[in-house]
C-alpha cells in the first residue's frame, strides 16, 4: 500500500484569499499524479493530470505544480470563492492503481 | 446523461444482510474501479476490471466482498453478511484505458449498516 499524504486536512479561508495545499507521494515508480475536486453531494471531478517533473497546469484560478524527484505536488487557488468549497483529492498513479490521499477539505467563508 | 451512474444512492440495511450495488460506467470505458470511502479518509481501492476481467482485488478486502462485470459493461459489488464496519460510501469510477487519463466517478452509494 502506497502512502499518499495531503496537508492540511482542512482549511477555512475568507473569500478572496489565496491558498494552497500539498500532496506528498513516493518519489519512486512515478507514473502520474491527478488532482480531483469533490463537492458535497456530487461526484469527484478531475482537475489535473500531471505526468512530467516540473509540470505546471492551470484551470482558471486553480493551478498545480509537480515535483516528482522530491515527491510532492502543490495545488493553488487564487482569490478563493465560496464555490471553491470542496474536498481536494490527489491520486498517485502506479501499476494501473490510483492511490488517493485523505484529501484537503476547503471551506471558503463569504 | 452519459456519465457514470450508481444505484442505489443510499442503502440502509441490518447487520447480517446481503447488499448489492450497481455501477454503469461510460459506455466506451474499458476500465472500471470500485472504491470505498469513510469519513476523514480518501477513497480506498477495492477492485478493478479491464473489460470483463477482474484484474486486481485489494488484499484488505474480506471474502464477504465480491464484484462482477459481466460482458464488460455494468458492474455489481456484493457484500454478504454485512457488518457495521462496512458502512461507507462506495464509489465506482471508469476510464477509457490509459493511466494518463482521468477517472470519471459516479455519485456513489452510501451504505449504512445498522
Image: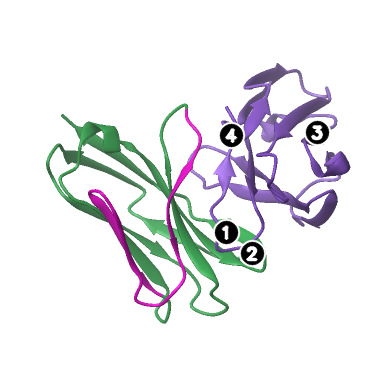
Tag 4 subunit = B
Q: Quadrant of residue A76?
A: bottom left
Observer-side mark, 2 or 1, equals 1
Q: In the rendered image of this protein, which colour is used for chain A?
A: green
Tell me which secondary structure the magenta stretch mostly adopts: strand
Task: Give the residue pinned by disc 3.
Answer: B79
Q: Quadrant of residue B7?
A: top right
Q: Quadrant of residue A82?
A: top left
- SS under mark 3: strand
* Image quadrant containing the N terminus of chain B: top right
Tag 2 subunit = A
Task: Give the residue pinned by disc 2.
Answer: A1
Q: Please tell me whether residue A52 belongs to the stretch shown in magenta.
A: yes
* Image quadrant containing the C terminus of chain B: top right
- SS under mark 4: loop
Identify the residue at horizontal 73%, vertical 18% (top origin). B13
Task: Give the residue pinned by disc 1.
Answer: A99
Identify the residue at horizontal 79%, vertical 27% (top origin). B20
Identify the residue at horizontal 43%, vertical 77% (top origin). A68
Earlier along the polypeptide chain: callout 2 or callout 1? 2
Q: In the rendered image of this protein, which colour is used for chain B?
A: purple
Rounded to the nearest angstrom, the CA distance separating label 4 from label 1 is: 22 Å
Q: Which label was assigned to residue B5? A: none
Task: Give the residue pinned by disc 4.
Answer: B3
Amino acid at each position: 500500500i502506497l502512502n499518499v499524504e495531503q496537508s492540511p486536512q482542512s482549511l477555512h479561508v475568507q473569500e478572496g484569499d489565496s491558498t494552497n495545499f500539498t500532496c506528498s507521494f513516493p518519489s519512486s515508480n512515478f507514473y502520474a499524479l491527478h488532482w480531483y475536486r469533490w463537492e458535497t453531494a456530487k461526484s469527484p471531478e478531475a482537475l489535473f493530470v500531471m505526468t512530467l517533473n516540473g509540470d505546471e497546469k492551470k484551470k482558471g484560478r486553480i493551478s498545480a505544480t509537480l515535483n516528482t524527484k522530491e515527491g510532492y505536488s502543490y495545488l493553488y487557488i487564487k482569490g478563493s470563492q465560496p464555490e471553491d468549497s470542496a474536498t481536494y483529492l490527489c491520486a498517485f498513479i502506479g501499476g494501473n492503481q490510483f492511490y488517493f490521499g485523505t484529501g484537503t477539505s476547503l471551506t471558503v467563508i463569504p | 446523461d452519459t456519465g457514470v451512474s450508481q444505484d442505489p444512492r443510499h442503502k440502509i440495511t441490518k447487520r447480517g444482510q446481503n447488499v448489492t450495488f450497481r455501477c454503469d460506467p461510460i459506455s466506451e470505458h474499458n476500465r472500471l474501479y470500485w472504491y470505498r470511502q469513510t469519513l476523514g479518509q480518501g477513497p480506498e481501492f477495492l477492485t478493478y476490471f479491464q473489460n470483463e476481467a477482474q484484474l486486481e482485488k485489494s488484499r484488505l478486502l474480506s471474502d464477504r466482498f465480491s464484484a462482477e462485470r459481466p460482458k464488460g459493461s455494468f458492474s455489481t459489488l456484493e457484500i454478504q453478511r454485512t457488518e457495521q464496519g462496512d458502512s461507507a460510501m462506495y464509489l465506482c469510477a471508469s476510464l477509457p484505458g490509459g493511466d494518463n487519463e482521468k477517472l470519471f466517478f459516479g455519485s456513489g452509494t452510501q451504505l449504512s449498516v445498522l
